[in-house]
Amino acid sequence: MDTLPSLIRDLVVANRILAHEGVVDGYGHISVRHPERSDRMLLSRSRSPELVEASDIVEYDFEGKACDGDTRPPYLERFIHGGIYAKRPDVHAVVHSHAEGVLPYTISDVPLKVVLHQAAYTGTHVAKWDIADKFGDTDLLVTNNDHGHDLAHTLGDASVVLMRGHGFTAAASSLFKVLRIAVYLPVNARVLTDAHTLGGQIKAMTPGEITRHASIDTESPASRRAWEYWARRAGCEHML
Amino acid sequence: MDTLPSLIRDLVVANRILAHEGVVDGYGHISVRHPERSDRMLLSRSRSPELVEASDIVEYDFEGKACDGDTRPPYLERFIHGGIYAKRPDVHAVVHSHAEGVLPYTISDVPLKVVLHQAAYTGTHVAKWDIADKFGDTDLLVTNNDHGHDLAHTLGDASVVLMRGHGFTAAASSLFKVLRIAVYLPVNARVLTDAHTLGGQIKAMTPGEITRHASIDTESPASRRAWEYWARRAGCEHML
Amino acid sequence: MDTLPSLIRDLVVANRILAHEGVVDGYGHISVRHPERSDRMLLSRSRSPELVEASDIVEYDFEGKACDGDTRPPYLERFIHGGIYAKRPDVHAVVHSHAEGVLPYTISDVPLKVVLHQAAYTGTHVAKWDIADKFGDTDLLVTNNDHGHDLAHTLGDASVVLMRGHGFTAAASSLFKVLRIAVYLPVNARVLTDAHTLGGQIKAMTPGEITRHASIDTESPASRRAWEYWARRAGCEHML
Amino acid sequence: MDTLPSLIRDLVVANRILAHEGVVDGYGHISVRHPERSDRMLLSRSRSPELVEASDIVEYDFEGKACDGDTRPPYLERFIHGGIYAKRPDVHAVVHSHAEGVLPYTISDVPLKVVLHQAAYTGTHVAKWDIADKFGDTDLLVTNNDHGHDLAHTLGDASVVLMRGHGFTAAASSLFKVLRIAVYLPVNARVLTDAHTLGGQIKAMTPGEITRHASIDTESPASRRAWEYWARRAGCEHML
């Protein structure tokens, strides 16, 4: 089990990786479940992921309240994270992203299928959430616990939920897995879009293939080498 | 209210941000209304936005004449800005851009709908202007007050006007809002183009959703964090 | 009239600009007609444009022979340049490029129309050359004077000729004009491709619009500011 | 014939080039046949290509066993390389890549034709392999000798085999040739995809054109200049 300081350090690295790999820009965020207090999560204060430092990480409960009296402005959409942790004990890390490659699938009725093994941690089903279904006309943001719980309800047992006109949220059992989903789902989406351009038949991964690939150990050398690569590119060698 | 020096500093930062985020290249420009003289605007002399410094900023009247005797060559298309400020007292900042993602919609009859919440400041209607409608064969440039007034007339109450074969112009009540439109409208356009590739049904934002999102306070922490992020990426930390 | 040293310096800058703007990679080249000897051209020895220095520039006649006994390997395709200069006294600069945005139009029968004012120096007609029409199965390269003359014949009075499965060649009356064509033709091509994706009606520039825009003085402040911008980005401030 | 140290140095450079040109990311690898022991190959330990150094290169037999007792974790998919070297004595270098441009053709039944001369080393036929045809539901990875031999069988006499939902593998008679295929096949793929977007007739290279272009000497100045260019861009001037 990770100690708190090492997990915070990895969370900072993960923030930088998401920014450097183009998964997030000024917006988007990543959290982990607290390693000692399973009813809390660690998430940066309202800051762009590329700039996040260890001192920006705050402990929140799943209602989105800072646990240690931190008064710095929080992310408006921290309810995305709280809603999922509250509902899914198996989830230890959550990413929310507006990655451009995925966005077309949030506004189209064409399904985002997993076609690339690199994206297999996404799982066999991608959920879709339209905030308007339950809440009517909003600003599309997940700004309260009702929104967060409804999003988590739509996510269900899946790992990814598309959010109409907004982005996606990924949930996984570890920081590495959620990072891998967040990096490769946009690639999978762009490749699928280009395959639609070609106009022929498209062969997606089968559920069996997805399940087998998704069971690869995230502590394997292949996984660790991706972490090393991403972290170095993001300027975080010194944090490895 | 911003003081003149702080507004000029922000305008320089905004020039650099537009260049770094790929909204402008050697061409394109951004202006603000003068904070003390509502009949004047601040705009760089003819210089590529990435290179603009405080000493490049010139005061112009809305006919495009330099107010302080500055004799350095002005932008040929400063009439875009003057025409809009003259007609729209609510507008305090204007961007003109040739951003590639938006350009297909300037030559196609397929409408550029707002589909992403990030682009909601664009508003519920995107205007389209074809200089040929009134002026016949030209070089497509907005090079005099007649052109500028006609463009502003077509813009009407909207925030964005597409210019056929040329680019777009965005107008907003603040520098941050116009910057946000300019950064995210190309993203919205690319995502919509990709959604068309998929060939299914597309769900745009509703007018109610756009209006709600567009009313988010630009002084919110979320807005300020984007400014910090963009400015740092553009090498302007020292100007924050 | 440019002096020889200043023209060579500008040619080096133009090489770096083309590389930095993504118009050429390890391949592709740019030449100018000799300012004092109208039957000669200045072109780098076989070197990637990003790396070209003044000492790499060689004088060639229009048959592709080095005039000063230079024995360093020349570009295999220098006949592109010689063929055009020999046929077109009005041409003072030539670019050959494999820019990706343009390539689809070299293998498709869909025409590459000028739709953006930035690309207007391209002119009202884009020529298309298929080396197989006259020479049957080749390696697609322009490796002798027969190839070069045939390409120039197909170019005719136009400014751009597409080369099937290969790239394009642009010819213009000045270094700045040919550079502008080379930078903006790929943008025009990508925008047109995206407009085709949208599936609606597309409005190209009219011949009158193209002609008017193409007559803009290349010594205007707007032109000089693009050169400054491109040169600085390419790391050539010290050569301005 | 290359000496072992110079070949290892070139292999390190090739790793860095593939990373810098976007052909590989944290995953993907490149190998060469041992210059003195034709039954062995040189391949990095499990490390991202951008980070590979000479000390990472390991000698493996074609069953994927390290020959010198190296115990560092190997690439999981080294069987791709061993399978091909064992079957194809003419092959001296192999690249495995997940390059995004090529991926749509691995999941679509639309053929990846060679349309650009730059991609002509790809050859007249691109093979396609679906691991499910022989092995049913797997994780799509080539993780044992049976997989490797089957892949090599499908490759046959070709230079490139597409791997469904995964990527491609290229095999050639030299490091330069395989690098050139790996760099330009994604370009060829993207251009072909865009040509499909245009919706007109597409003209591919003829077999005769491909064969002629593919016979160009890789020791030509044009080839050496590409190597110099790619190596410098990848930060490897000091290794030239």
Image (cartoon, coloured by chain):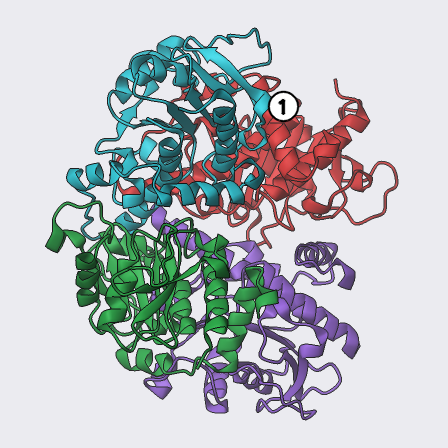
Chain colours: A green, B cyan, C red, D purple
Q: Residue at x 54, y 8 (%)?
A: B68
Q: Residue at x 57, y 28 (%)?
A: B52
Q: Residue furthest front?
A: A69
Residue A91 % position (x, y): 31, 74
Res. B15 in view: yes
Q: Nearer the viewer, residue C230 or D230?
A: C230
Label 1, residues with CA under 10 Å away: few <14, some 14-19, many ≥20? some
Label 1 marks which chain's residue? C
Q: Residue furthest right?
A: C69
Q: Residue at x 24, y 65 (%)?
A: A83
Left/right placement of residue A67 relative to residue D43 reads left
Question: Quadrant location of the N terminus of chain D?
Answer: bottom right
Q: Nearer the viewer, residue D75 or B90?
A: B90
Question: Mark 1 — residue?
Answer: C173
Residue A131 % position (x, y): 17, 54
Q: How many numbered dots are placed on residues in this image?
A: 1
Q: Quadrant of residue B134?
A: top left
Image height check: is C45 above or below C210? below
Question: Quadrant location of the C terminus of chain D?
Answer: bottom right
Residue D175 % position (x, y): 66, 70
Res. D240 in view: no
User: Which amino acid, by three-letter code, is at mark 1?
Assistant: Ser
Left/right placement of residue B58 relative to residue C237 reads left
Q: Nearer the viewer, residue B9 or A55?
A: A55
Q: Secondary structure at mark 1?
A: loop
Q: Residue at x 36, y 22 (%)?
A: B92
Q: Quadrant of residue D88?
A: bottom right
